Image (cartoon, rainbow, N blue to C red):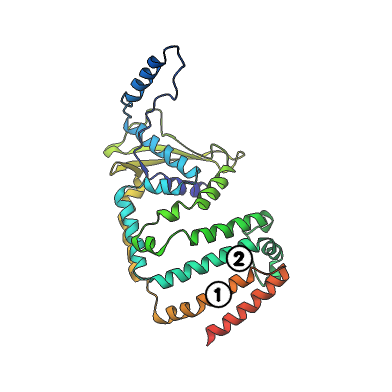
């Protein structure tokens, strides 16, 4: 759990050098309204207190954590240095160059239909998951169906459908992933999930009392995570450095170029050959119509029977 949280923090804490100096909200009421207004204006016009590098770094990480807890992944993404965002867009564009509009839109439509089916059939799917052997499935030991509810299955289906509709082909081709990150269901589900954790499940503090900057402007910050109120907090000191005016984990900055090269190499090697494209053109419409028809099943048994029949039909089509 610690590593998962630290990974989330590292991703979230590639953050802007946000200035945290703020005046106190509101002004006391007084008999002389103009004097109070003038005083408030003077406070607002006063320059914010300059932050030390260590205060600036902590304020940035705190802002990233707050955005993550609120489910605002688009804000977290905006905290990346501009060149990092450009690199990510470049990788997305490289993949988009290998996928034409019809193929992309077929895939998005198929994914949306799958999500709609899951949402519509949540109670029946819940019943079938309670007896996976009847489906010929062997679920991993880590999957505890007792901890899953029909409402959670419905929410998952709605999220899949919403995500499939979030990113248009034009955005994909332009490398613009912000519509995907700002998906409201993603934000809501993430915030809802994190709200189940302790309020201090993730926090940032100075690594020591003085938080003395290290060589080359490196600032050590202490990240504390806790999975539940019963767990002891776990801490890890993470070094941050400013890149293009934004604070990022030192380890991320050092490995960023290699990460981008690897991702770009993967995009350049990605190919959809003629046979795979032909199969996609043939099967995608059939699969989409099948998923749509399964939404009308009135019971778990009917859903299972229809699904099995569809699998057999599609299997025969693939063998032709």
The residue under the point 62% across, 81% down is 312
The residue under the point 46% across, 16% down is 29
Q: In this view, does 235 lie above or below 87?
A: above
Q: In this view, does 317 lie above or below 7?
A: below
Graded by Cα atoms within 10 Å as few (under 14), some (14 to 19) or many (20 or more), the crowding at tag 1 reads: some
From the top left corner, tell me how far across and down residue 138 is, in percent: 65, 68
From the top left corner, tell me how far across and down residue 262 is, in percent: 34, 62
Q: In this view, does 100 lie above or below 185?
A: below
Graded by Cα atoms within 10 Å as few (under 14), some (14 to 19) or many (20 or more), the crowding at tag 2 reads: many
Q: Earlier in the sequence, mark 1 or mark 2?
A: 2
The residue under the point 72% across, 71% down is 301
The residue to which callout 2 is attached is 117
Query: Which one is nearer the viewer's eye here, 317 or 263?
Result: 317
From the top left corner, tell me how far across and down residue 187 is, in percent: 50, 49
The residue to which callout 1 is attached is 287
From the top left corner, tell me how far across and down residue 310 is, in percent: 62, 77
Query: Which one is nearer the viewer's eye here, 83 or 30?
Result: 30
């Amino acid at each position: 759990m610690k590593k998962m949280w630290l990974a989330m923090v590292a991703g979230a804490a590639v953050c802007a050098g946000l200035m945290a100096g703020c005046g106190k909200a509101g002004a006391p009421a007084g008999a002389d309204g103009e004097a109070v207004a003038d005083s408030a204006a003077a406070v607002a016009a006063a320059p914010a207190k300059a932050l030390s590098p260590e205060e600036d770094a902590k304020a940035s990480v705190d802002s990233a954590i707050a955005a993550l807890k609120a489910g605002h992944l688009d804000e977290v993404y905006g905290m990346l240095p501009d060149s990092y965002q450009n690199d990510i867009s470049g990788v997305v564009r490289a993949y988009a160059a290998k996928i034409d509009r019809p193929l992309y839109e077929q895939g998005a439509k198929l994914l949306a239909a799958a999500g709609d089916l899951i949402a519509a059939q949540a109670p029946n799917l819940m019943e079938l998951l309670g007896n996976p052997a009847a489906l010929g499935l062997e679920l991993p030991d880590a999957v505890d169906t007792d901890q899953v509810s029909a409402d959670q299955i419905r929410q998952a289906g709605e999220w899949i459908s919403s995500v499939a509709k979030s990113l248009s082909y034009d955005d994909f081709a332009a490398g613009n992933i912000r519509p995907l990150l700002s998906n409201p269901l993603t934000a809501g589900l993430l915030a809802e999930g994190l709200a189940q954790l302790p309020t201090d499940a993730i926090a940032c503090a100075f690594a020591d009392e003085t938080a003395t900057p290290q060589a080359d402007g490196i600032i050590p910050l202490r990240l504390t995570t806790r999975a539940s109120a019963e767990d002891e907090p776990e801490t890890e000191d993470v070094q941050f450095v400013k890149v293009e005016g934004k604070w990022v984990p030192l380890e991320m900055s050092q490995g960023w170029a290699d990460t981008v090269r690897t991702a770009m190499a993967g995009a350049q090697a990605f190919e959809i050959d003629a046979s795979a494209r032909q199969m996609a053109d043939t099967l995608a419409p059939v699969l989409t119509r099948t998923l749509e028809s399964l939404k009308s099943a009135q019971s778990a048994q009917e859903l299972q029977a229809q699904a099995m029949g569809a699998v057999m039909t599609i299997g025969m089509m693939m063998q032709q």
